[in-house]
Image: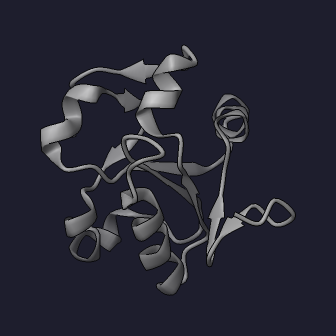
């Protein structure tokens, strides 16, 4: 990661503090859980969409290109959030990857949802 630009390769990264601040401020940000449904038992960042990485191309129409997108997955050992962010960036979206994922989010006692409908 380049600490000066907050990027890893060509993907912009966002911290839990930055993401939480955006959500608390009511900014127009689309938070997308890109995990496979088998991992939904981990929970979700409150208000996030569920679009598994392998369905992302087919479901691009569910995302608003005028709004920032933040992708996340399970945690730092999961690469799905970065892969999804790369795909979206190549398609013209303003996107960041939250690498800490649902694990870090929950450990920090930030707002989560459990087993909510997609």
- Residue 101 located left or right of residue 62: right
Q: Which x, y percent locates residue 29?
A: 59, 50
- Residue 65 located left or right of residue 9: left
Give 91 or 1, whichever is nearer the viewer.
1
Say which quarter of the image contains residue 44: top left
Question: Is 76 placed above or below 89 here?
Answer: above
Residue at the spot 67% in from the left edge and 43% down from the top edge: 15
Q: Which x, y percent locates residue 50?
A: 29, 47
Say which quarter of the image contains residue 16: top right
**Residue at the limit of the structure toward the left, as seen here:** 38
Q: How many marks are shown on the rendered structure?
A: 0
Say whether residue 46 is visible: no
Residue at the spot 42% in from the left edge and 33% down from the top edge: 102
- Residue 8 located left or right of residue 49: right
Give 26 or 4, whichever is nearer the viewer.
4
Say which quarter of the image contains residue 1: bottom right
Question: What colour scheme governs how the chains and residues are painted in the rendered image of this protein?
Answer: one colour
Q: Which x, y percent locates residue 58?
A: 21, 75
Residue at the spot 43% in from the left edge and 57% down from the top edge: 81
Residue at the spot 53% in from the left edge and 40% down from the top edge: 100
Say whether residue 84 is visible: yes
**Residue at the limit of the structure toward the top, as seen here:** 109
């Amino acid at each position: 990661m380049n600490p000066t630009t907050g990027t890893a390769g060509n993907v912009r990264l966002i911290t839990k503090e930055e993401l939480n601040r955006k959500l608390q401020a009511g900014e127009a940000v689309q938070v997308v859980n890109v995990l496979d449904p088998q991992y939904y038992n981990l929970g979700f960042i409150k208000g996030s969409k569920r679009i598994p990485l392998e369905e992302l191309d087919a479901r691009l129409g569910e995302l608003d290109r005028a709004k920032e997108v933040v992708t996340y997955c399970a945690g730092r050992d999961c690469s799905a959030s970065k892969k999804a962010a790369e795909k979206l960036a190549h398609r013209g979206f303003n996107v960041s990857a939250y690498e800490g994922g649902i694990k870090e989010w929950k450990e920090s006692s930030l707002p989560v949802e459990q087993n909510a409908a997609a």
